[in-house]
Amino acid sequence: MDGRAMPRLARSWSWELDDRRLRLKLRDDVVLHDGRRFDSQFAAEALAVAIARGANRALYPALRDVTAAIPDGRFDLLLDVSRPSALLPEDLTVLVDIAAGPYRPVRQTDDTIEFERFEQFYLGSPAITRVELRSFDTLRTTWASLLRGDLDVVYDVPAEAVEFVRSDDVQIVPLKRWYQFAIAFNSRRGPLQRAEVRRALNLAIDRDALIRGVFGGAGSPSSGPLWPQYWAADSSVGPYKFDPGQAAALLDSAGFPLRPSSAGAPASRFQFTCLIPENFSVVERMALRVQKDLFNIGVDVRFTVVPVTQFGKLVGSNDFDAAFLDMISGPTPGRAYIFWASAERFQGAYNVFGYENPESERLFEILRTTRNEAAVRSATRRLQRVLLDDPPALFLVWRERARAIRKEFTFQNQAGIDPVFSLWSWKRQSDTLVASAP
């Protein structure tokens, strides 16, 4: 998946009125689980509800551009916008929870949701008649249930656990995630206000060693906040090379030389504190390696582990120097926009890190408004370079995950495509699927 919007409940779309109106041609064969037809009136009402939610407008910024949703006949929906809004088609995935999928829930307990197939699913009646979604308290219990045959699918297998579940009966389907691990800087504080300091910290990290040591090689180094497989991304940009010598030179030139510390402590350039959410062992393991690499160039980073409930509040209130995040960064620049757009122009829930760069802001606006492919490629390439020179975070690793699926199932296994997306077309000897919750 390269970040291009693809039709699902709509067959196609087109822009009108000098890109001030988006015409969606909806499918005419979609039946909702309650028996109603998915038509333009229903879609307009569902979209109005979605746009009214502040959380949706923060995560899908193009929704703010919509001024009206107007049914035009039974299966055409017109969306009027206040300005050209190139990201709007992708942001319409906000309607993903419309009850028109291949399975509908019929029973729920504390740890299980049972679904039955929906015979009128618009892509065809699912071959598997029933799905149970179960949640487990521990990974060990999940793996044991899979190997015993009590489970058919484990939805989210960490790379470091793949070898524990691989067997003659279980196939592993690796997937690249749209999320990456990064340490987001509070660009309003101390040395972290300086672009050359943030760049130096990125140069100090041995990402290849980090990936080998923590993830067993299942990951790729990050070069910034843009998804590297986005269709307009320039593959020649990044990742940062591991160069502690250049990192130290940058800090020297920025006015942060090594200074002796008191009480016999090692010399250091400066210190900052980074928040870590509690009970995330993989983050803690990464933090130790990052701490060592930064210590080697004379930067003292101290990690503070806080409960998840406090973590979000501290970040939202700007009461931090840096924060260790597993952050969505793909598949399009719209995901990066919600974190790194100027807070002076975009009042969002996620761009709380104080990052301000006039050139990146100009390029983000081009990507938000233009549909010209040449202009998108050019702006994306320049944005990659701007964010490499003036990084808003310490970008670390694009992490891989996997699905574990018993081999008695047959399904389309396309590279980069999550097989769960085509669950309705899977086949097996039995007609019941039991899966673990993510």
Image (spheres, helix red, strand yellow):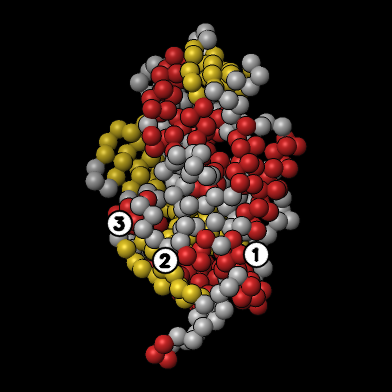
Label 3 SS: helix
**Three-letter code, disc 2:** Cys
How far apart, in angstroms, are the residues tagged by discs 3 and 1?
32 Å
Residue tagged by mark 3? 310
Residue 322 sits in which quadrant?
bottom left
Quarter of the image for the N terminus: give it: top right
How far apart, in angstroms, are the residues tagged by discs 3 and 2?
14 Å
Residue at 33%, 48% in the rendered image: 134
Residue at 34%, 56% in the rendered image: 314
Label 1 SS: loop
Please tell me which residue lies in front, 364 or 212: 364
Mark 2: give few (<14), some (14-19) or many (20+) Cα within 10 Å.
some
Instruction: Locate residue 136 relative to residue 289 in the image: left or right.
Output: left
Residue tagged by mark 1? 240
Q: Decide: is 166 above or below 258.
A: above
**Residue 250 picture location, percent across and down:** 63, 71
- Closer to the chain start, of discs 3 and 2, is 2
Instruction: Locate residue 283 relative to residue 115 in the image: left or right.
Output: right
Q: Does any portion of residue 136 appear in the rendered image?
A: no
